[in-house]
Image (tube, rainbow, N blue to C red):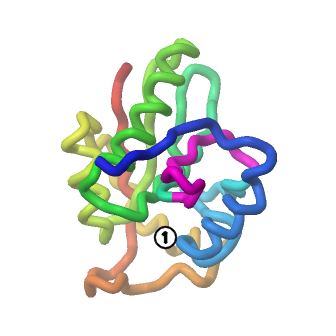
């Protein structure tokens, strides 16, 4: 794994987080299960290199005794950045007494589905046709992903703590 520093998102990171989200998600907000999230306003963790360059970001939202991972991005795949970010959220959730961590991804996101399942997350629901509603809120969501799979459904995964 590259030499990284992992730390909570700080107030002074908000503009950089917003730019990062726009670059990787197309706008400064994301939509999941019909809800709009503004990741730059959410708690999270950043992974940076020795120069302070942003290598990854995870944001989350707490709901009573559950923790939802809203976004997770790593600029270098298969070197442990995403895993480290996810573990940081898991440790925080355990410390706050959460019963589960959960998230949504889309049916076309095969790498994410594999990534989360390899880390113990289980598929618990397929929300068929959910992206039609999400596109009403965020029309820029593609109909077909770059891998050629039609984007239709949200898949819910969870890790019981």
Please provide percent x and percent y for residue 134.
58, 69
Could you tell me which residue is drawn at 60 percent across and 62 percent down?
31
Q: Which residues are magenta?
A: 41-54
Q: Nearer the viewer, residue 151 or 52?
A: 52
Instruction: Indicate the quadrant containing the C terminus: top left, top right, bottom left or bottom right.
Output: top left
Task: Please say if 36 is above or below 156.
Answer: below
Could you tell me which residue is drawn at 53 percent across and 23 percent down?
92
Q: Quadrant of residue 135?
A: bottom right
Left-right relation of 157 to 148 = right
Could you tell me which residue is drawn at 57 percent across and 20 percent down?
65
Q: Nearer the viewer, residue 17 or 144?
A: 17
Please provide percent x and percent y for residue 98.
51, 19
Could you tell me which residue is drawn at 30 percent across and 61 percent down?
77
Magenta stretch encompasses residue 89 = no
Task: Please say if 30 is above or below 100.
Answer: below
Q: Which residue is mark 1?
A: 131
Q: Nearer the viewer, residue 152 or 2?
A: 2
């Amino acid at each position: 794994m590259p030499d990284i520093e992992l730390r909570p998102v700080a107030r002074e990171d908000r503009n950089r987080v917003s730019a990062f989200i726009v670059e990787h998600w197309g706008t400064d907000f994301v939509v999941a299960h019909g809800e709009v999230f503004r990741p730059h306003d959410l708690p999270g963790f950043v992974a940076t290199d020795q120069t302070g360059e942003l290598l990854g970001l995870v944001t989350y939202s707490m709901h009573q005794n559950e923790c939802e991972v809203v976004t997770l991005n790593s600029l270098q795949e298969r070197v442990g950045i995403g895993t480290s970010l996810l573990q940081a959220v898991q440790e925080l959730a355990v410390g706050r007494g959460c019963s589960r961590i959960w998230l949504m991804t889309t049916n076309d996101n095969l790498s994410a589905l594999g990534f989360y399942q390899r880390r113990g997350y289980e598929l618990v629901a397929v929300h068929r046709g959910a992206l039609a509603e999400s596109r009403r809120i965020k029309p820029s969501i593609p109909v077909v992903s770059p891998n050629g799979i039609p984007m239709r459904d949200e898949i819910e995964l969870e890790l019981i703590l």
